Image (spheres, helix red, strand yellow):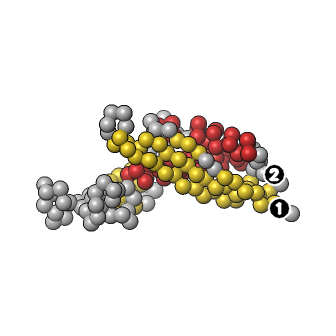
């Protein structure tokens, strides 16, 4: 087993607090020393009480899901002798009321675009299989209760 930690820090400043008009901006720190600005989503709490330039928890979850999937995909492609030059993608979570009536992420869609080079490009089936296995191995995907779909595209740049 392993542990993974992050820290959060928020201060009230001169806000009254009990009137619910306190700032939602805070910082999120990671063990490697990176500190990022965090806030509630502007869809949940309107600016200026939230900060649309900061990372909200839902975005952070989508980033973790996309990153985990990508890292597994890269490892699996390398093991198959495929050369990946570029991997970019979006992760979009759709929120709404769940079966219990609570607001939750109901579905996530990963849309990676991958560029391969080298002697061999994967077939469409191999590409889909790589994404399927990456999804199966991703610890973040294995931790969420909502379905995750992957709709990727790829290109191959032939080398001489």
- The answer to which of 116 and 47 lies nearer the viewer is 47
Q: Quadrant of residue 51?
A: bottom left
Residue 156: x %, y % from top left: 76, 57
Q: Contact, CB < 8 Å: mark 2 with mark 1?
A: no
Residue 122: x %, y % from top left: 76, 48
Question: Residue at position x 46%, y 38% from top?
Answer: 146
Residue 151: x %, y % from top left: 61, 47
Residue 69 showing in the rendered view: yes
Residue 48: x %, y % from top left: 27, 66
Instruction: Say whether disc 2 or disc 1 marks the residue closer to the N-terminus.
Output: 2
- From the image, tell me which residue sits under label 1: 159
Is 155 situated left or right of 19 in this image? right
Question: Residue at position x 43%, y 54% from top?
Answer: 59
- From the image, tell me which residue sits under label 2: 120
Question: Residue at position x 69%, y 40% from top?
Answer: 129
- Check residue 49 in the rendering and tell me which mark sits there, or answer none: none
At mark 2, the secondary structure is loop
The image shows a total of numbered marks equal to 2
Question: Residue at position x 35%, y 41% from top?
Answer: 97
Disc 2 from disc 1: Cα separation: 10 Å
- The answer to which of 102 and 86 lies nearer the viewer is 102
Q: Quadrant of residue 33?
A: bottom left
At mark 1, the secondary structure is loop
Q: Residue furthest right?
A: 160
């Amino acid at each position: 087993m392993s542990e993974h930690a992050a820290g959060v820090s928020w201060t009230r400043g001169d806000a009254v607090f009990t009137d619910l008009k306190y700032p939602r901006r805070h910082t999120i720190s990671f063990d490697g020393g990176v500190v990022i600005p965090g806030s509630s989503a502007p869809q949940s709490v309107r600016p200026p009480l939230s900060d649309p330039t900061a990372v909200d928890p839902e975005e952070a979850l989508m980033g973790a899901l996309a990153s985990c999937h990508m890292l597994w995909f890269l490892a699996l492609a390398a093991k198959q002798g495929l050369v990946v030059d570029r991997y970019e993608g979006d992760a979009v979570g759709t929120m709404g009321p769940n079966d219990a009536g609570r607001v939750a992420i109901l579905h996530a869609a990963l849309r990676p675009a991958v560029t391969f080079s080298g002697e061999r490009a994967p077939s469409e089936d191999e590409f889909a299989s790589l994404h399927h296995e990456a999804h199966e191995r991703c610890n973040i995907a294995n931790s969420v209760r909502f379905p995750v779909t992957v709709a990727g595209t790829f290109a191959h740049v032939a080398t001489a």
